Structure formats: structure tokens, C-alpha cells
Image (tube, coloured by chain):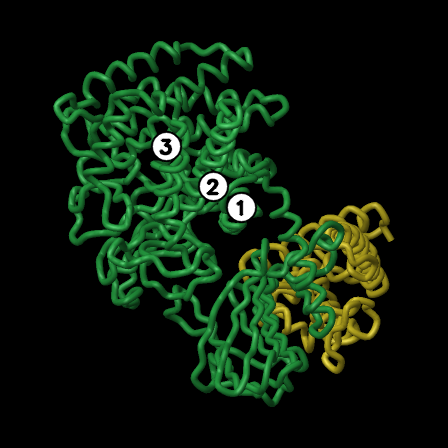
Amino acid sequence: MNVGSALLWGFSATVVLTTMLSGARALGLTRIDIPFMLGTLFTSDRDRAKWAGFLFHFLNGWLFAFVYVAAFESTGYRSALFGMAIGAVHAAFVLIVAMGLLPAFHPRMASETHGPDPTRLLEPPGFLALNYGRGTPTATFAAHLIYGALLGFFYRGG
Amino acid sequence: MSPTASYRSTQRYVDDTNVLVTDFVGSTGRARLIDSFSVARGRGARLLAPDHEILRVLEGVEGEMGLSFVFAPRRELGTRPIPLERFKPFGIRCSQKGGLLLLRTSLPAQALELEGARARGRFRLRAGERVIFSLTYNAEAPGVVPPLGEAALERLRETEAYWRQWASRARYQGPYERLVRRSALALKLLCFAPSGAVIAAPTTSLPETRGGSRNWDYRYCWLRDAAFTTRALTRLGYLDESAAYLGWLLHSTRLTWPRLQTLYSVYGGPSAPERVVPELSGYAGSRPVRVGNAASHQHQLDVYGEVIDAFSELLPHLGRVDGETRKMLTGFARTLAERWPEPDHGIWEIRGEPAQYTHSKVMAWAGLERFASISLRCGWRASFDAREEAKRIREAIEREGFNPTLPSYVQSFGGRALDASLLTLPLTRYCSPSDARFEATRSAVVSALAAPGLLIRRYAPGSDGLEGTEGAFALCNFWLAEGLALAGRPVEALRWFRAVVDRLNPLGLAPEELDPREPPPAGTFPSERAAGSGAYLGNYPQGFSHVGLINSACEISRALASARVSGRRSA
């Protein structure tokens, strides 16, 4: 494994993914703000949550690059297309599994079975995070496909 | 939201807050509806809360009452419905501008019927029962869904406490204290917190004549109005709001500097294209309904003077003045020095040919005079002599803006028409309030422009070239009152002041204009009066009118105090 290349392209792909999701929000395709959602795991202070969530999200993106790289190394195959395939699985996991589980472990998120209370008052994402806008699955898939494609195309094995 | 059977209703604010109370009185009972925009204070402001929330708490006061409500949000000025959907278990939601609009209620879910773009419900309320409605907007996800019940009541208490604390900062003692604080609270609601801009009024196309065509969009930040507002807020001690406006001003005018536009959007955008909305029939059938304002591209000389004057009022409260501010103000003053001989559209934004308006020249004089004083105080050096230019303007005003045959200052150079804006001459310190020429002007303006009920029109009917008539301009009464107070005549000043104040509605909110044909309602304080006198004309509530109320009340209070002191001395 080429750690240097994984770090460099993991960083770059995360920058692109974050920018794409922010852009989709600015264009009104989705309301999802992943840094805010993650940051509120740690704090109820809105400003601090944004910063903490941004760092956490960025670190996640960087670390996930190593999962992609491990897949490239173990199969001995890497290309933009293969990266996109992993990205599609990644996005599906995030939208179907992680988002579904979120209300169960997020300390500040209300759930669709229990309404909000003074502690748990964040809107739950729902299936495919559709509560955050109809364009959310599309934007999330697109961002992860590009993330995978960048890693698959630029990563140079060790 | 209304009772299902016949009822009477009255409205008032909770004292010193922007929390509105509507009392419904029916044949079987009484209910109270409390409306507020939730505000969080201190650390709470940073904690999880929706971007915006309208909180409505309905309380049964006596007996039993049937009530119904409809929720039908619309966009594009009400012309397009927005489809609604249930969002279990939270309430009813819709998407608006990419954000989430969510209606929640403490009523059971089955009490809400949903039909496409409309939700409705009916319920009965007994004494001691309470129903809560919360309408929230979240631009980002996950949005914050505020809980109802005790948590919502706590938000209401928090909001009331915020406003009371804000209102308590008003430095004013004198007649009509509650009304002055109400005016400050109304002005605060016209401030756009994210940018510091101050809008003229939150409405468009409320007619200046019922059924007429004088319908304009005031949902913009007029530099002139905002400068007046800043001055009034500075006078009352609200320096944060004044400084925020100054920051907005310096930011928003950067694109057009050193030229100043008449108005900007709350975000500082210089464009406000005017169009007619043919789908809307207008208030009381007053067409056309306009969006945008063509006055944005008019040349209005007085704006420069107003802005420099507002800055000079704030200057003693500011720390160091930075280089950027100096550059901006110098540019405005230089523009004044170069362009003051040009004709303009004047303070009333008359949509005809530009003219040499006397009020505009007076404000040009004031702007250059203030700039000269600011330069002296801050040790600035400009490439032009502001005081010398101000002297030239004064000579022109005295030569061409005063008609000795009337005798009076006149609306425009060489003319004979009178204009209530001339009442501001001593307020801008152009002349003493007891100056002989001004005294003659005041008498001439009052006799030419006073309408029944001691109300002053801004100019003679029909002189703006538009069809139809309009009401009396509330601000003009306040100018007259302030000038009289400055001249040491507070009792007379109070008479003109009361002519408007006695016509205010129960909420104490002022319109742009008043219909002089309508008699003032009974009751000494607005909240004691019955609603719906029908005397209000133009966009509402109007910042300009509230500014006038505050400034004239401050001056009357000062004049009354000095009259008391001199009375004691002579005794």
C-alpha cells in the first residue's frame, strides 16, 4: 500500500465530496449538512457542532480512503470505474444503514416513533435520508461516486 | 385562527415586548391567542433551535369556545400554493426554497385534516385549556424540531424576557414613554439582523388612497429612512443597532461608491427592478400591486447628506474611525460637492422630471457641514473645501429657495409651491427654529398644507403628477412638533404630536399616511382604543413615522424639562 498516495488522494477526494455536498445544498437539491449532523453527536452548541463535525467528517473521509485503497490492493485492480463501484456501495450503506440507525445512537436526534423532547430535537433522516430533501439520495450517490472515481483513478499502488 | 361562532376581537402587545395578544370574546366564552417569533438569549442563542419559529399559544380564558384554523402556505406573493404532507409523528411539512417548513400542534393528529396544499382543523377549547402551534423553518438538515408543552411555554417566556430587557435599555423619560418604547420595538423589527439593514416597512402596495394606484414596495432599505432610524435609535441609546446599520451601509454601498443609490436590498444588492403583479387585486381593490421599486435609480441628493449626518451622530460613540470608513465618507462628500447643483427627484421621489428641490439642497449643505466637522474632529484632510462648498449651497438656497413674496422657503428653486419637507430646516441645523424666515415658512406651510384634524400633507394634492389624492403624511406632523419643541414651544408641539398619536391603532403601530377625513378614535392610549378606525393609508408599520415619533417626543420632553426649570427659576 502506498500510504503517501492514499493520504494525498484521500484528502483530495474528501475535499471534492465535501464541496459537492455543500454545492448541492446551495443549489437547493438537498438540505443535508453532514458536518452539522456529526458535530451534534458531541455538542449541542450550534457553532461548535459545525466545526467539530467538519473535522470529524474530514477525518472520516480520509480514513475511508484506506478502505478503498485496501480494496484496490487486495483485488489488484484499480480504476475510476472500480472506485465508483465501491463508492456506490459506500453511499448505499450510508443512506440505508447508517441513516436508518442514526436516531438510535445520536443523542440529540428525535426518532419517527418518539417525537422530540428538549434533548432529542433534531429531525431524523428517514429512509434514504429523504426527510432532508428528495435530492438527498442523488446528491449523496453522486458525491460518493466521484469520491471513489478520484481514488480509483489517481491512487498509485505501492 | 378564529372562533367558529360570531365573536369580537381586540389586539395588544404584552407590555414592552413584540409578543402579540389577540383576545376573542364570543357568546359562550373567551380565549386568548399569544403570538411570538421565538428569540433565544445569551448562550441559548447558540444552542439547537430552528432558524425561525412562530409560536402561537391559545388559552381558554372563560367558558367554552369552538375554534378553527387553516394552514395554507403560498409562495410568489400568494399566487402559488405549496403542497403539504404529513411528517409523522411531528406534524405537517412542506418544502420552501429548499428549506423545511414544519407545522406542529399539541392537538391530536386526527384534529388536522390535510387536503393538498391546505391543512385545517376544528376544536373546542374550555377555560384553563391550552393549545400550542409552532411553525418552524430550517434551511439545513437535520432541522431542529422544537418540542411543544412546557418547553414551548419556556421559549415564550424567554422571548418576552428578551424584549423586556431590550426595551428597558431605551433612554427616554417624558410624555408617552410607553409609546416611545413601542416605536423603538417596532423599529427593531424593521432591522434585518443578519446584515444590519433597516427596511422602510415590511409591506408592499398598501395603498396611499383606497382603491388608488399609489401603491409601492417598501420592503427595501432606503438609505434616507435607515439614516433617520439610526439617529432615533442612537438617541435612545441603542448603539449596537446603529453600529450594525453603519456596517451594512459601508458594505452595501461598496458596489456603487462613491455614488449612493436611493435604496438597496437587505443583503446590500443594488438592484430592485419594479414590476406589476397582475394576478393580485391589491388591498381594497387597489391596483396595481408592485414588486421592486423604480426609485432605486433616481438621483436623490439628500441621501448623501442623510448618511453623513447619521454617521456624525454616531461618531461620538464610536472608537477609532478606520481608513475604509474615512474613504467612503470622503467619497460621498466629494460627490455632494460636485453634484449639488444638479436637479434631483427629491425626498418624495417624485416620478416626473428632476427639479432643484430646496430640501435636497439643504441636505447637501448639511452633509458638507457635517463632513467638515467630522474631518476637523478626526484630523482628516480632503482635496476639497467642504465648508466653502456648503457656504455656496446656502447662498443658492437663500437666493433661489426663498420666495419673499410669500414669504417662505419653497419646494423648488424659483417656485411658489410649498412642501412639508421644509419643516426639517431647523432639525438639520440649517437655521434656528426661531429664525424669522423659517418662522414665516412654518406658518405658510401649516396654512397651505394642514388638513382637517391638525394633520399635515407633504405637498399640495396633485402636485406629484399622479392620479388621485393621498392622505396626510404622519412624519410631517412630527417634524412640525419637533421644530416647535426646538423653538421652546412644547405645548404647541404636543398639539401637533397628539394629532397623529391620538389616531394610532390599539397596537401603537404607525402607518405612512392618515386619512384626515376619519375622526380620531376614543381612548387616551392606543391599547384602549377599538381597532379598525380605517384611517390608515400606505405601507405599514412605517419606520419613518416611528422615527418621527421618537425624535419629536425626545425634543418635546427636553423642551418641557427646560420650561419647568425656567419656571422654577422665575418663581
* Number of the front mark, 3 or 2: 3
Q: Do callouts 2 and 1 point to residues on the same chain?
A: yes
Residue identifier under label 3 = B484
- Helix, strand, or loop for circle 3? helix
- Which chain did the renderer colour yellow? A
Residue B70 seen in the current view: no
Q: Which residue lies furthest to the left in this view?
A: B405
Q: Badge 2 local density, few (<14 within 10 Å), some, or many (20+)?
A: many
- The answer for which chain carries disc 3 is B
Location of residue B291 with respect to B297 vertically, above or below: below
Please name the residue shown 63% across and 61% down the image. B38
Residue type pointed to by label 2: Ile
Q: Mark 2 lies on which chain?
A: B
What is the x, y in percent for residue B383? 42, 10
Q: Do labels 3 and 1 share a chain?
A: yes
- Of labels 3 and 1, earlier in sequence is 1
| SS for dot 2 | helix
